[in-house]
Image (cartoon, grey):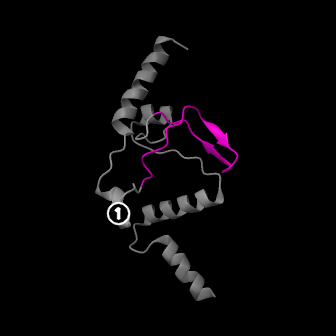
């Protein structure tokens, strides 16, 4: 597809991606003792093509730049904000995401996994 509208769209995707989706490590990336590695799991592994990995039973997304968040080009260009898209198909990934989202939206001093651990001790 080489039409002018497509070329303009892809130009916008590139511009927005470089400005909005590029990660630069800062102090928050190393909170909670995460010295030596980024809290947000950067740098991503560069992948030439998206594929299914049967060993981990997961979808591995194409990644051309290790510092760019995974994104949807339509959401990026129409909404013009950063976002991170992940396939969450496993129980482990879904559980980790649930903890992250609940901690993020509640902004409590106590983490979700600590509350659940306390509840399980109380019930047992």
The residue nearer to you, when weighing 94 against 77, is 94
- Dominant secondary-structure state across the stretch colored magenta: loop
SS of the residue under disc 1: helix
Q: Residue 73 at what x, y percent from top left?
A: 49, 32
Q: Residue at x 35, y 63 (%)?
A: 31
State left or right for residue 89 relative to residue 77.
right
Quadrant where the N terminus is found in the figure: top right
Note whether 83 is above or below 36 in the view shown.
above
Chain part drawn in magenta: 40-64
In the orientation shown, which residue stands out farthest toward the left? 27
Q: Who's the residue at 36% across and 66% down the image?
A: 33
Residue visible at 43% across and 61% down in the picture: 104
50 magenta-colored: yes
The question of residue 86 being in magenta is answered with no
x then y, percent, for residue 117: 55, 79
Q: Quadrant of the C terminus?
A: bottom right
Disc 1 marks which residue?
A: 31
Direction from residue 93 to residue 79 in the image, left or right:
left
- Could you say where residue 121 lies in the image, as x and y percent from the top left? 58, 86
User: Is residue 19 placed above or below 111 in the rendered structure?
Assistant: above
Q: What residue is shown at x 43% (from left), y 40% (from top)?
A: 66
Question: Does 19 sit left or right of 47 as displayed?
Answer: left
Query: Would you place residue 54 above or below residue 97 in this image?
Result: above
Q: Is residue 31 above or below residue 4?
A: below
How many other residues sit within 10 Å of disc 1, few (<14), some (14-19) or many (≥20)?
few
In the foreground, 105 or 83: 83
Q: How many marks?
A: 1
Q: Position of residue 120 (x, y in %)?
A: 59, 82
């Amino acid at each position: 597809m080489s039409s002018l509208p497509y070329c303009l769209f892809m130009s916008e995707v590139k511009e927005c991606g470089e400005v909005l989706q590029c990660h630069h490590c800062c102090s928050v990336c190393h909170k909670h003792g995460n010295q030596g590695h980024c809290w947000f799991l950067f740098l991503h592994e560069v992948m030439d093509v998206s594929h299914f990995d049967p060993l981990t039973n997961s979808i591995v997304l194409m990644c051309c730049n290790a510092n760019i968040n995974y994104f949807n080009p339509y959401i990026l260009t129409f909404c013009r904000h950063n976002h991170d898209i992940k396939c969450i198909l496993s129980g482990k990934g879904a559980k980790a995401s649930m903890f992250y989202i609940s901690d993020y939206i509640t902004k409590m001093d106590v983490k979700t996994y600590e509350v659940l651990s306390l509840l399980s001790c109380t019930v047992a």
